[in-house]
Amino acid sequence: METEQAWTHLGAGEGVERDLAGTLQSVFGFSGFRPHQEEVVRALLDGRDVFAVMPTGAGKSLCYQLPALLLPGVCLVISPLISLMKDQVDAAKAIGLKAAFLNSSQGAAEQREVAAALRAGELDLLYVSPERFAMDSFTALLGSVRLGFVAIDEAHCISEWGHDFRPDYLQLAQIVKLFPSCPIAAFTATATRRVARDIIGKLGLRSPYELRASFNRPNLFYQVLPKTDPDRQLLAFVRSRPGQQGIIYRMTRRSVEETAAVLCANGIRALPYHAGLEDKVRSAHQEAFNRDETDVVVATIAFGMGIDKSNVRYVVHGDLPKNIESYYQETGRAGRDGDPAHCLLLFGYGDAPRITYFIEQITDHTARRHAQNCLQDMVRFGSAHVCRRKQLLAYFNEQYPEENCGTCDVCAGDAEEVDATVEAQMLLSAMVRTGNRFGANHILDVVAGANTQKIRQFGHDQLKTYGVGSGKSKRYLQRVLQNLESQGFVQRSGDRYPVLGVTRRSGAVLGGEKRFRMIKPVETAAVWESRSGADEAAAPCHMPLFEALRVLRKQIAAQQGVPPFVVFSDRTLREMSASMPSNATEMQCVGGVGAHKMAQYGDAFLDAIRGFRQEHPALEPLVVEDYVVLPPKRSSRSGTVLETRALLEQGLGVEAIATQRGLTAETIMGHIEKLAADGCAVDIDSLVDTKKLEPIAAILREQERDDLKPVFEHFGGGVSYGQIRLARAWLRLRAAGAA
Ligand code: ADP
Ligand code: MG
């Protein structure tokens, strides 16, 4: 009978013709269909199941709203976000559709009203969440009304292979069982072929009309930059786009908070968004963004489907996304209005190992392999000298037809390529000669000619490839190795202790018939290096003042018997010499001047600056475009550090804590270091051999820079980096009189 339903009003073909064009114009106000909309609408009018993959901004809503208007009965729309339902319904009502929603945000009376309207056949569209659909009372209610068809938005949420699996969506498999003659239309903006098959199978669609629109988003420009100092880079990027709104994605809640704080401290309207914020705060921030009341939202990937904004002009990833699918989906939120928009990825080689660490926690073997492969694709996207657009589309099994897309950094000629064939040959050959059964570190050690226990044990110092790369930096060799893997010349096998081996493709590189190229890697210093070293030369300041402050620092350091960097880092002095603070408040805006240091050294430095300004009355504080105000550090530590503290207080040692928490001892040491920096008492005796503390202090004191390597080398590996850092933290604490 319901099949009949779908046909009764379709009988007169001509009538429908007129209805389609006329309704599109008169109700929606659109002069024509966007690509593929019409075919989807027609399939639904024909009573068929539909599975449509159409990119964000393609106009999926219209694909079910128009048939909902034309077909008898109500169209049930399953939509994942309660927070968006009201807006969607308001928008539909605004053009005269009879729409309503049912969800837990409504009071009982309101829900009764909607149910009554539904029973009375007064609705074209009813929006509900998958949870609501799972309720027996609701399906009973549906059974009593005339159901035209069911539209499922964000249908990829039903697939575990998709990037946003939601267990609630699995309930939707009941639709075909409960309402066997009701057509189903599933929509998503993202699905590989595998995910598509999975969705169709899980929903039980019956030979659906399948549509796969092109994934190409011609108005998006894709760019990848090496990640050096993300907060500064992000600030510079945002500053270069005044008046535009955009999203910055970061991997952790903590980095979200920090980046948002840096932006705010520099006068940018920015708000954080992550799952750790209270619901109320989170939705307020989202609202502010949707209503253009803030320019930037800095978010974890928790920020997604709630973005109902078509004028997002840029999406920046401050960290590596875990796979191309998420990357495509997240960047897809830019430029839905069709105007040009920019997608920037800050690519740091250090991010992949961090993600791998989490992937290794996945217990299911197949899922773990899948996640690892996806990550490799992502690394390849950032590091191979191949059109970014081509790579993205290839991921969705789509071949981009043009030679040069013109709108990515590779095609625009902004990305520099290097030939690393020689290094690649060294690494591949080392793998072959050691039998393709060692991990990355060992292979690098062989090529670099390191003298390790393992190398001696296996006699690998006798190999022809031993030490052939000793003239190259180990970092660089490591980059080449990562690129070899991401480009498919090396494969990883074995689970807990992965080993690397050559692949069939590598023969050509080894034999010299094929060159191996990659995007030139830019080296990123570790944080504590960059904080006190490399990039400082770039920060402008008044040099004579800087020199004067360094002399003062040295005096104070000598008096207190501590290394100079313990007083203030070079970077802090540089910032002081640029902004020339004249009082305590201004002083504390300088990065590295917390309350504690202000109390200890603030006056001495303020006096020096005051004196200098009297001698040089013409000098103005420098306000350079690149000037960055670092916000005061948050005093509260992240949960993981606090957890370590709790266990320490219970009397557990580092090893025991590491085992219990499934973390490495070095990580726990890092936590303790942070706790020490916060002034928490640390039982140093149990962590570092106290006889070594004074020598460590002596070596640190000798140098201006905060360099741990000389200490490490002095003890010939007898003290780990974690212990050295801990000792440093403790020495600082002692210098500050707290230990
Ligand atoms: P999607 O859900 O696929 O991301 P939406 O349904 O939200 O896309 O539509 C994106 C924008 O395109 C909306 O502003 C919508 O009004 C507009 N739109 C949809 N169809 C058409 C059309 N045929 N002509 C003009 N604009 C359209
Ligand atoms: Mg949509």
Image: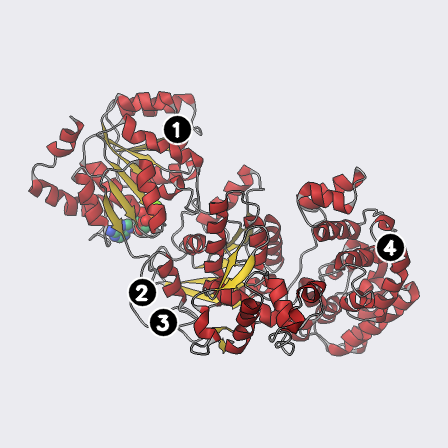
2 or 3: mark nearer the eye: 2
Other residues around mark 2 within 10 Å, as few (<14) / some (14–19) / many (≥20)? some
Mark 4 or mark 1, which is nearer the start of the sequence?
1
Mark 1 or mark 3, which is nearer the start of the sequence?
1
Mark 3 or mark 2, which is nearer the start of the sequence?
2
Q: Which mark is residue 132?
A: 1
SS for callout 4: loop
Q: Are marks 3 and 1 in contact (CB under 8 Å)?
A: no
Mark 3 or mark 4, which is nearer the start of the sequence?
3
Rendered location of residue 89, percent (x, y): 34, 37
Snapshot quadrant of residue 588: bottom right
SS for callout 3: loop
Inter-mark Cα distance, 3 to 1? 46 Å
Q: Give the residue at the far right of this rendering.
A: 559
Q: Which mark is residue 689?
A: 4
Q: Inspect the image, locate mark 2, and give the three-letter code of the amino acid beneath it.
A: Tyr
Q: Quadrant of the N terminus?
A: top left
- The residue indicated by pointer 2 is 400
- The residue indicated by pointer 3 is 406
Other residues around mark 4 within 10 Å, as few (<14) / some (14–19) / many (≥20)? few
